[in-house]
Amino acid sequence: MDYIIENAMSVEEGHRTKVSMLVRDCEIRYFGSKSLNHSLLKMDARSFIITPSFIYFAPNIPDQSFEEFKFYISDQFLKKGCGTLITHFEISRLKDFDKMLINKRISLLNSPIDFLLGVRVQAAILNPSLIIKCKQMKIPLIFVEINRISELEKIPWGWIKDASFPYNPIFIPTFPPSMKTYRRKLMSQKWNSILQTEKLPHLSQPLQPNIPLKIEIIKKIGLYPKKGILKVGGEISYNLFLQTNEFDHVSKDIKECEPSIAVQKGKFTFINETPIFRPGAGDEITINKTSLFV
């Protein structure tokens, strides 16, 4: 269906702009501040704030029955305006890589949301062979669980850097839940020092679940500009939030509320306070190059 959303409010870096969006032939043909005079169905959205669909980190998607999976995804993600999930599979040995990757893909066959896969490993098994495997299978995210600083010092970072080129997967630290805050801080400092010295693409802190990812993270991972942006030629994935007084000062409040309407790839996924679960509508995302817009 072709239509125009006009007079919606876009909030970027604390600044508000009135915008219009033209959707035609299943594509965004215009997104900007000028008024549109096309003779198409129009929605006056002056009461709404518009955002791109959100991207969430979901490390613990449970392996459940279909009904339990449906409820979990609907409650945790669809009703929050999530259009993309980042999750991972875990391995303790390199020879388990293919098996665990297949199992993870099977568990997400019914996902109504697009997803990006990473692999989680203990620091002790991070080696060039793992990096080469990730390059071959187009797995762009490597979550490294760190328990002790000595583990970081034993990793052959120079060889890993050589093996990473040119795909350059992103290294992301993770810590055991029981680790105390001061130890996490020490680990993070050591992590950043090493990876900055080696000039390896990485995140300085673990990804946080349950909150939409920031644009700088989306760019580094390589999802931008496929995801997390409304642009001409881009995906028709957006949220509409009814404006209230709580949005007057800080845009981050939007991400703490449910949208009034959520659209993913041109179809409703949340409307009238009801998630719309479409089994298998989500696709696995392939990243050909990370950090393109950093």
Image (tube, rainbow, N blue to C red):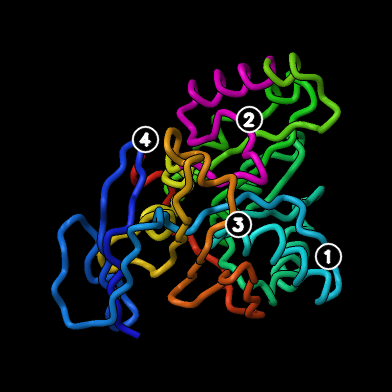
Question: Residue 136 is drawn in which quadrant?
Answer: bottom right
Question: What residue lies at 35% left-to-right and 63% top-to-bottom?
Answer: 45
From the top left corner, tell me how far across and down residue 154 is, in percent. Answer: 71, 24
Q: Which residues are magenta?
A: 186-214
In magenta segment, residue 33? no
Query: Would you name the residue on which mark 3 appears?
Result: 80
Marks 1, 3: nearer the viewer: 3
Residue 112 located left or right of residue 138 = right
Give the alpha-carbon distance from disc 2 to disc 4, as whole Å.
Answer: 43 Å
Residue 207 or residue 31, whichever sits in front: 31
Residue 49 or residue 54, whichever sits in front: 49
Query: Dot 3, how many residues are within 10 Å of its Cα: few (below 14), some (14-19), or many (20+)?
Result: many
Q: Which mark is residue 277?
A: none
Give the alpha-carbon distance from disc 2 to disc 1, as whole Å.
Answer: 34 Å
Q: Is residue 136 something one can see in this rendering?
A: no
Question: What residue lies at 42% left-to-right and 54% top-to-bottom?
Answer: 51
